């Protein structure tokens, strides 16, 4: 993936720091980071995962937006039923293997996965609350 530029780079770093702190993993703790990655790749213990593939057309931007909206609606419908979902781009590292095992055509790209189930509110990752920038920083109003 291309490097994030500012202000996204700063926000990305803050998110990573808050995430690893919530998981009790210090910056130099390589084993801890590997354990966190292993949790990520085993769906954080969720009993099932939805893998969102999109048909690849042109620069993929339009379809990417469509599937992003589908993912958000899926997350909201889980929440409405007392379930929780974790969107995970990281699962895309194994898109090739998933495609092979589930026999998904090559012209479909994996966008992300959503692990889901009943959330364990006590799990370290679920106790993390990420700040949001104020609306005035993320929206430009024109009169
Ligand atoms: C599209 C998308 C992809 C994400 N990919 C990952 C991922 O691969 N691994 C991970 O631990 N968190 C990932 N996250 C972040 C978490 O799913 C979750 O959003 C984060 O822990 C903070 O939750 P919040 O959005 O409710 O603040 C992703 C979030 C989004 C929206």
Image (tube, rainbow, N blue to C red):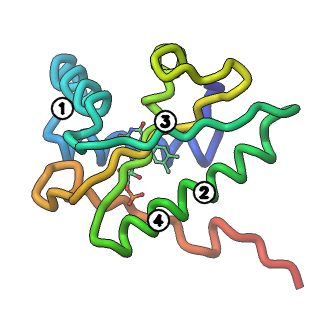
Measure how far apart labels 3 and 1 are at the Cα level: 23 Å
Quadrant containing the N terminus in the rendered view? top right
Task: Characterize the local packing of mark 1: few (<14), some (14-19) or many (20 or more) Cα atoms within 10 angstroms.
Answer: some
Answer left or right for 93 relative to 42.
right
The residue that appears at 60% across and 57% down in the rendered structure is 70
Instruction: Read off the residue under disc 3.
Output: 89
- Tag 1 near tag 4, CB within 8 Å: no
The relative height of residue 59 versus residue 100 in the rendered view (above or below) is below
Whether ligand 1 has any atom under 8 Å from the Cβ at mark 2 is answered as: no
Determine whether the beta carbon of the residue marked 3 sits less than 8 angstroms from the nearest atom of ligand 1.
Answer: yes
Classify residue 18 as left or right of residue 97: left
Q: Which residue is mark 2?
A: 70
Q: Residue at x 42, y 46 (%)?
A: 114
Disc nearer the start of the sequence (2/3)? 2
Q: Residue at x 26, y 54 (%)?
A: 117
> Hey, which quadrant is residue 40 in on the image?
top left
Q: Earlier in the sequence, mark 2 or mark 1?
A: 1
Is label 1's Cβ within 8 Å of ligand 1? no
- How crowded pointer 2 is (Cα within 10 Å; few <14, some 14-19, many 20+) is rated as few
Front-most of 16 and 58? Answer: 58
**Tag 1's secondary structure?**
loop
Mark 4 secondary-structure assignment: loop
Nearest to N terminus: mark 3 or mark 1: 1
Judge left or right: residue 22 versus residue 12: left
Q: Which residue is mark 4?
A: 132
Mark 2 or mark 1, whichever is nearer to me: 2
- Residue 116's spot in the image, x, y percent? 32, 51
Which mark is drawn over residue 26? 1
């Amino acid at each position: 993936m291309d490097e994030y530029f500012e202000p996204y780079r700063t926000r990305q770093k803050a998110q990573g720091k808050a995430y690893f702190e919530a998981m009790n993993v210090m910056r130099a703790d390589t084993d801890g980071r590997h354990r966190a990655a292993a949790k990520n790749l085993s769906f954080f213990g969720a009993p099932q995962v939805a893998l969102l593939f999109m048909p690849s057309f042109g620069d993929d931007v339009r379809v990417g937006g469509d599937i992003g909206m589908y993912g958000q609606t899926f997350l909201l419908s889980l929440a409405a039923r007392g379930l929780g979902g974790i969107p995970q781009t990281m699962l895309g590292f194994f898109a090739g293997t998933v495609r092979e095992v589930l026999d998904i055509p090559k012209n479909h790209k994996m966008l992300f996965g959503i692990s889901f189930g009943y959330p364990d509110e006590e799990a370290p990752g679920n106790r993390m609350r990420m700040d949001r920038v104020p609306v005035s920083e993320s929206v430009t109003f024109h009169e």
